[in-house]
Amino acid sequence: MAADLGITPIVDLDTGGVIALQAAGNGHGNISAVIQTIHNVTGSDALLPLVLPVPAIVVIGGSAAMAPLHEALRISGRRPGEIIIMVRGDFAQHDRRALLIGLEGLRAIGYLIAVGDLGTGHIPLDLLVDAGPYLAVISPELVSRTPRDARRSALAESLAALARGVGAHVLAPGISDEAQLTAVRGWGVRLAQGPLLIPGPSGRVHVPIPVVEQEPVQALLGPRVQEFLLPAVTLPYAATAEDAAEAFGSEPSITSVILVDEYQRPRGSLDRSRFLLSIATRFGHALHGKKPAARLADTARTVPKTTPAIAAMQFAGRDTARVYDDLVVTDEVGRCMGVVRVADLIRQVAAMQH
């Protein structure tokens, strides 16, 4: 992980493991340095997620302005789900809507979103609410003056608490000494990078302070369920059991059918195995075929899209009879966005623990 490649390792302070790389940006309102970094990253580094700083003005410019970045990632074989776009820099108030539209477009493609330079950048704090970022990055200028400047330390700590409160993970950049590291750990920050955190030959970092007691929300740190989202097969709540049987019969990989109301809110869930078992009995079709499928449905097990993977898996395990049923992922107003298979969550959690 050479510095001359324009990349900095991001470290999980609990494990000492490098979990991502951050690319350098030139701060001149373009993405040329970021694109060069993408081309430079090869070998084992290419297996790690990338945090790419992108000026707000480029995101505001829409798909045309972002096209060179998309192309560089395509050539490098990178998938959007491996990339965190970190928006930073000034933007005019009248461009706010365009910025949010641009961020939503990037999220729709599959990129994760971060907001950078919190505390010194000219980014309204309520943008954290509207943008719903996966990651919030404290300004390196604030971190550099911690803990010697008590007032700036207090500001940085409050920003970290705010970011966690709106559902974002928090990154503290530019850690150069143990006093700074102790301070950011006291704020509940788990992700950091900087000169102090250089991996050794093993690829891990010696974190030179004791692990502090974690808040419950920090113990749930991990990818959100929306990263494992699969399209849901939905039917109107009034659909018949015959309709559901036809849906299951159309594709053997379908593990559930979600019954939704007129607003696409989940009202019930049909598990493939249990439903087909009910229909396949000697008189099953005669008993159920023309009647509402809801008679055979279970309550939909819903989780908000921002739920961490570990929390979702814990939720799934509360009902031992349905532990492997698909979870239904919902948006801010309770609409069905898709489903998550518990087996995918188990694989992810197992990978996090190695």
Image: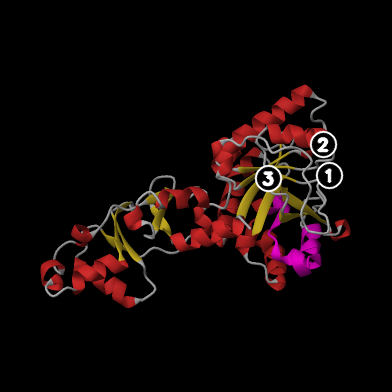
Whether residue 4 sits left or right of residue 215 in the image: it is: right
Q: Quadrant of residue 162?
A: top right
Residue to which mark 1 is pinned: 196
For the N terminus, the quadrant is bottom right
Asked which secondary structure carries label 2, the reply is helix
Earlier in the chain: of badge 3 and badge 1, it is 3
For the residues labelled 3 and 1, the Cα–Cα distance comes to 15 Å
- Identify the disc placed on residue 272: none
> What is the three-letter code of the residue carrying label 2?
Glu
> What is the three-letter code of the residue carrying label 3?
Asp
Q: Which secondary structure type mostly characterizes the magenta part of the structure? A: helix
**Residue drawn 62% across the image and 32% down it:** 161
For the residues labelled 2 and 3, the Cα–Cα distance comes to 15 Å
Do residues under tags 2 and 1 come within 8 Å of each other at their CB atoms?
yes
Whether residue 123 sits left or right of residue 322 in the image: it is: right
Residue 56 appears anywhere in the view = no
Tell me where the magenta segment starts and ends, as one range.
32-58
Residue to which mark 3 is pinned: 14
Asked which secondary structure carries label 3, the reply is loop
Q: Is the residue 21 above or below the residue 176 in the image?
A: below
In the rendered image, residue 354, in percent from the top left (x then y), is placed at 63, 58
